[in-house]
Image (cartoon, helix red, strand yellow):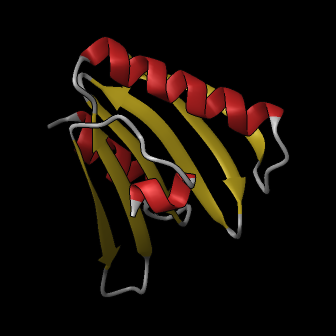
Amino acid sequence: MVNRLHGKPIQVKKAWVAYYKDTHQNKAIIWVSEAFTSSQGKKQTEIMMEKILKGKSPFYNFQEKEISHTLIYFFSGLGKNHAVFYKNKLVFWITANHQTIDKIINYYLNL
């Protein structure tokens, strides 16, 4: 799924996608890829954000925030809120509504 989304193979150890929905109909999708090294995870995150910022994309309202010593890229688009960050070897892209995105980010930052 990750390779299909990017339209080409991505150099990752493994990847997975999680779909969440709570009793209040809040939904989220969490894309996670595991890089072979922490520096590779950082580089993949930086390249992804650079391409999104420079290319034609449906995303807007970009912000960078540091939370728990982790740089997180926040933006909007496609009717949802998005957050992208890496933690060690893991690269996260979280898509959720504004009611749940902060809770989900905090969960993954505290793993």
Which residue is located at x 28 percent, y 66 percent? 18
Q: Nearer the viewer, residue 49 or 85?
A: 49
Instruction: Give the position of the N terminus as an image quadrant.
Output: bottom left
Which residue is located at x 48 percent, y 62 percent? 4
Q: Position of residue 47 (x, y in %)?
A: 58, 25
Q: Inspect this view and state whether residue 68 appears.
A: no
In the rendered view, would you say 16 is above or below 61? below
Residue furthest to the right: 56
Which residue is located at x 41 percent, y 65 percent? 29
Residue furthest to the front: 8
In the rendered view, would you say 88 is above or below 75? above
Q: Nearer the viewer, residue 61 or 86?
A: 86
- Left or right of 79, for residue 46: left
Name the quadrant containing residue 7. bottom right
Q: Where is residue 72 in the image (x, y as percent from the top left)?
A: 50, 30
Q: Nearer the viewer, residue 18 or 105?
A: 18
Instruction: Give the position of the C terminus as an image quadrant.
Output: top left
- The tally of labels here is 0
Which residue is located at x 60 percent, y 40 percent? 74
Residue furthest to the left: 111
Q: Inspect this view and state whether residue 98 appears.
A: yes
Q: Where is residue 83 in the image (x, y as percent from the top left)?
A: 52, 44
Q: Which of 47 and 104 is in front in this view?
A: 47
Q: Position of residue 80 (x, y in %)?
A: 63, 65
